[in-house]
Image (tube, rainbow, N blue to C red):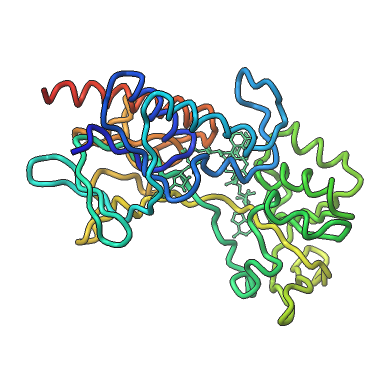
Amino acid sequence: MLDLAIIGGGPAGLSAGLYATRGGLKNVVMFEKGEPGGQITGSSEIENYPGQKNPGESGMDFMSTWAPQCMKFGLKHEMVNIIRVSQNADKTFKIVFDGGKEESAKSVIIATGSTPRRAGFKGEDEFFGRGVSTCATCDGFFYKNKEVAVLGGGDTAIEEAIYLANICSKVYIIHRREGFRAAPTTLEKARKNEKIEFITSATIKEAYGDKMGLNGLILNTKDGERDLKVPGIFTFVGLNVNNEILKQENGEFLCKMTNEGQVDVNLKMQTNIPGLFAAGDIRKDAPKQVVVAAGDGAVAALSALSYVESLN
Ligand code: FAD
Ligand code: NAP
């Protein structure tokens, strides 16, 4: 029986692991389906985490020290996809692995974060991985000295467009409105970049190509249809929270959720089920920032420590 199971190894899960193990919990396992680090490892740069030695470093470099620090204090990492968390009759938790294996824990922190949303235009799925991408750091280099498009008007789209402009000959930012969600300073930087062209009040009607991959996009713009001959489109249209593991066999969620599918927690990151906590992008009203996810993880771990102690 684990004292604490942490599901997800992004900033929230890793921070929870650090605080739980340093706080004295002995049997703590972080279940992460990939390498620890979370979604920020797909980002070309991060510069807004307080105290960073190298602002502007890649998300991968930034996160590289987090897991080793946690392991030093006794956090164990198991690389596995968790498919469900439910509650046993004795109020402990059952963690179900992909493949059927099960583990029990006295307390659980859900830190499964979020994943990029699909935009929904024709051809998006057909050319996904063959011209359509959600990761500029991973795929940008394939388009060295070529023209590419970026879809979206949030922080991710604008930041990644600036990154792509360092590699590609031209970057078109396609956005469905005139106004942008992205931070004004980031937007300003993009507007000053000569390699970036904004196409606003525009949507993608269709992505077209052949067996080799994407050849272009047909856009609906305020001036009519436009054929954008690009071999690559990077879509950054927001995130879906990864809440599937809380769905029970009867289709209901294990704990109280918001209408948007986020976990409803209080300021101690407690859900309405004693012993079950949530931290980071998955929780209600998350500002979706690394510093907040890390803070949440610490709070959730401290709450889990008190909970486990209260059982003795
Ligand atoms: P995540 O980082 O999403 O981590 C969740 C982890 O859980 C993942 O590693 C995932 O593999 C794992 N997981 C999910 N489901 C399961 C399962 N069923 N079983 C096992 N493991 C599972 N924030 C900033 O503060 N500054 C920035 O500059 C910044 N830039 C960004 C750039 C990009 C391109 C993106 C996508 C995000 C950026 N963010 C930035 C936001 C930031 O990355 C997130 O807010 C933060 O990573 C959330 O941390 P988390 O631990 O809650 O979730
Ligand atoms: P986001 O803020 O939700 O922005 C998504 C963008 O995609 C919006 O401009 C939206 O348009 C557009 N969009 C949504 N669905 C679309 C569709 N089907 N077709 C075309 N366009 C569509 O997502 P994000 O940029 O990934 O950011 C997610 C969170 O992470 C935010 O809270 C953000 O602040 C944070 N983040 C922070 C940083 C940083 O701090 N430096 C960096 C990256 C991300 P509308 O505006 O019209 O809705």
The quarter holding residue 231 reads: bottom right
Q: Quadrant of the N terminus?
A: top left
On screen, residue 145 versus residue 288, left or right, reads right
Residue 206 lies, in percent from the top left, at: 69, 74
Depth order, front residue of 37/234:
37
Vertical comparison of 164 with 64: above or below? below
Residue visible at 34% across and 24% down in the picture: 21
Residue 186 lies, in percent from the top left, at: 74, 35
The quarter holding residue 98 reads: bottom left
- Numbered circles on residues, count: 0
Vertical comparison of 284 with 128: above or below? above
Residue visible at 42% across and 50% down in the picture: 242
On screen, residue 229 versus residue 8, left or right, reads right
Residue, far bottom: 211
Residue, far right: 194
Residue 115 lies, in percent from the top left, at: 51, 51
Residue 239 lies, in percent from the top left, at: 53, 50
On screen, residue 255 versus residue 92, left or right, reads right
Residue visible at 41% across and 43% down in the picture: 8
Depth order, front residue of 128/198:
128
On screen, residue 18 versus residue 198, left or right, reads left
Residue visible at 11% across and 22% down in the picture: 312
Depth order, front residue of 137/252:
137
Residue, far left: 90
The quarter holding residue 120 reads: bottom right
